[in-house]
Image (cartoon, rainbow, N blue to C red):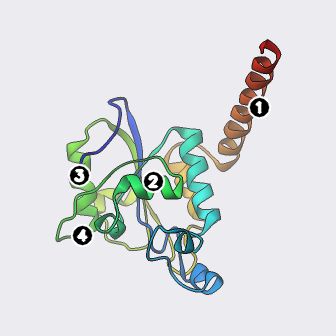
Amino acid sequence: MQDSFNTGGLRVIFLDIDGVLNSYRTYVAFGGFPHDLVPEHRQRFDEISISLLRNLCLAENISIVVSSSWREKFKWQEIGQVLGLPAIGETPTLATLRGEEIAAWLVKHPAVQQYAILDDKDEMLPKQAAHFVHTNAQEGISYGNFVHLCHIFGTDPIAVHNVLKDRARLEADSNDELAVLA
């Protein structure tokens, strides 16, 4: 499947879904695991985890590459759209460790400047250890995981919040100016 991205220095998160954006915690809370992207399953995802990830991507211009087995059932574009995440592609499906699939994607995309791997399974290569954020399938993304992810990209959670707050203020000011001109 073709990836969609610009040629500038890319910053990407390789995203697993099960054990990251849904967990045993959401299974108990919402009556089951999501197995589809339709609305009745969409509500079984952890909105806090998705919002943390989305906010980091928006604030720091980071894109998502789907490395989850969900890419075998759904197109990466659909996953990104339904979850509201800036997906640009997917890793190849190989009969090997997930770390090998990520390494294969990176070889084909030399424009990647920084990356992180968000996964509940430790199937990464030793050279990927500094990029790996290991979630717990019981909880999904924890705040500690989010802080770790921020540090990989050279930012912190408060900076992410402030960037988004400043952008919202600028958009509101711009909309006010347009309303006056109209």
Horizontally, residue 158 falls left or right of residue 147, namely right
The residue pinned by badge 1 equals: 169
Residues under labels 4 and 2: Cα distance?
23 Å
Compare marks 1 and 4 and give the one earlier in the sequence. Answer: 4
The amino acid at mark 1 is Arg
The residue pinned by badge 2 equals: 80
The residue pinned by badge 3 equals: 1
Could you classify mark 2 by the number of other residues whose Cα lies within 10 Å: few (under 14), some (14-19), or many (20 or more)?
Answer: some
Compare marks 3 and 2 and give the one earlier in the sequence. Answer: 3
Q: Position of residue 173 (x, y in %)?
A: 78, 24
Query: Element under label 4?
Result: loop
- Please, is residue 181 above or below residue 16 in the view? above
Residues under labels 1 and 4: Cα distance?
44 Å
Horizontally, residue 97 falls left or right of residue 80, namely left
Could you classify mark 1 by the number of other residues whose Cα lies within 10 Å: few (under 14), some (14-19), or many (20 or more)?
Answer: few
The amino acid at mark 3 is Met
The residue positioned 35% from the left and 64% from the top of the image is: 74
Nearest-to-viewer mark from 3 and 4: 3
The amino acid at mark 4 is Leu
The amino acid at mark 2 is Gly
Nearest to the observer: residue 132 or residue 62: 62
Could you classify mark 4 by the number of other residues whose Cα lies within 10 Å: few (under 14), some (14-19), or many (20 or more)?
Answer: few
The residue pinned by badge 4 equals: 97
Nearest to the observer: residue 98 or residue 90: 90
